[in-house]
């Protein structure tokens, strides 16, 4: 005696089989069905800071998912600005704090980042202006100090500020500060990448 097959269950079975087949093909060809993120998010954080410290900005920016550039590759045009920026760059250092916390397609890595406290340097430089001015007035000829109205030449005031800044930066390490950051990452486009934050950008700029 032949058993009758219930059309409903037969149809449902066929639909489920077809759905599984479609998902398998889609995952195989499109790569869009992500069951397990690949790669190490902590390695991305290290790659970013390593490239940044080495001045390989394009490599550093390639680790980000929200900006193609942070403008860190552009140096100031004035002498004092370049001096301060160079001191900032030379102060960079970082330490990864603990393991990277991964939650499905998101991750977070704690980082201790060292950088020059730019605001403190600028404040101490400004505090030296009067004493440096008084000293240089005694050393420079009047023609290099005053204009025809007996006002300071801009070239002289620039020299005063640059001199004061150089004196402050003779002990640049005294202005190094450590900031604890939480770097967020996400898995998209089949890779881990970082998101910037005001705290991260502020640390990279030395708090300026």
Image (cartoon, helix red, strand yellow):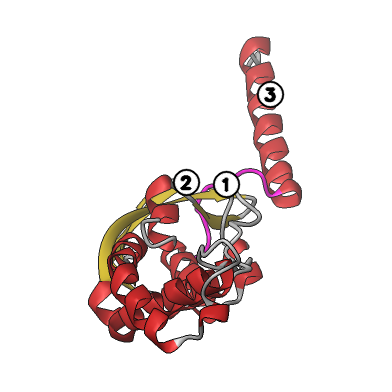
Q: Is residue 19 above or below residue 51?
A: above
The residue located at (66%, 68%) in the rendering is: 58
Q: Foreground mark, 2 or 1?
A: 2
Q: Magenta segment range?
A: 31-39
- 162 drawn magenta: no
- 35 drawn magenta: yes
Q: Residue furthest right?
A: 29
Provide the residue designation for mark 3: 15
The residue nearer to you, when weighing 152 against 208, is 152
Horizontal placement of 153 versus 114: left or right? right
**Where, by quadrant of the figure, is residue 165 drawn?**
bottom left
Question: Does the residue at mark 2 contact the one at mark 1 (Cβ under 8 Å)?
Answer: yes
Q: Callout 2: few (<14), some (14-19), or many (20+) C-alpha neighbours within 10 Å?
A: some
Circle nearer the N terminus (2, 3)? 3
The residue located at (35%, 80%) in the rendering is: 169
Whole-number angstrom distance, CA of label 2 to CA of label 1: 9 Å
């Amino acid at each position: 005696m032949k058993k009758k097959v219930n059309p409903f269950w037969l149809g449902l079975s066929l639909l489920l089989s077809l759905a599984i087949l479609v998902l398998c093909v889609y995952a195989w060809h499109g790569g869009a069905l992500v069951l397990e993120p690949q790669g190490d998010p902590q390695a991305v954080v290290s790659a970013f800071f390593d490239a940044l410290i080495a001045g390989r900005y394009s490599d550093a920016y390639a680790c980000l998912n929200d900006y193609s550039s942070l403008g860190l590759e552009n140096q100031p045009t004035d002498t004092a600005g370049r001096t301060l920026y160079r001191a900032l760059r030379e102060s960079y250092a970082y330490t990864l704090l603990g393991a990277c916390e991964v939650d499905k397609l998101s991750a977070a890595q704690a980082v201790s980042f060292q950088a020059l406290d730019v605001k403190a340097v600028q404040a101490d430089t400004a505090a030296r202006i009067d004493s440096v001015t008084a000293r240089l007035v005694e050393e420079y000829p009047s023609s290099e100090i005053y204009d025809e109205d007996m006002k300071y030449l801009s070239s002289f005031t620039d020299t005063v500020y640059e001199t004061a800044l150089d004196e402050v930066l003779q002990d640049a390490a005294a202005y190094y500060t450590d900031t604890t950051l939480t770097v967020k990452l996400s898995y998209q486009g089949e890779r881990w990448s970082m998101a910037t934050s005001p705290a991260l950008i502020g640390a990279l700029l030395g708090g300026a």
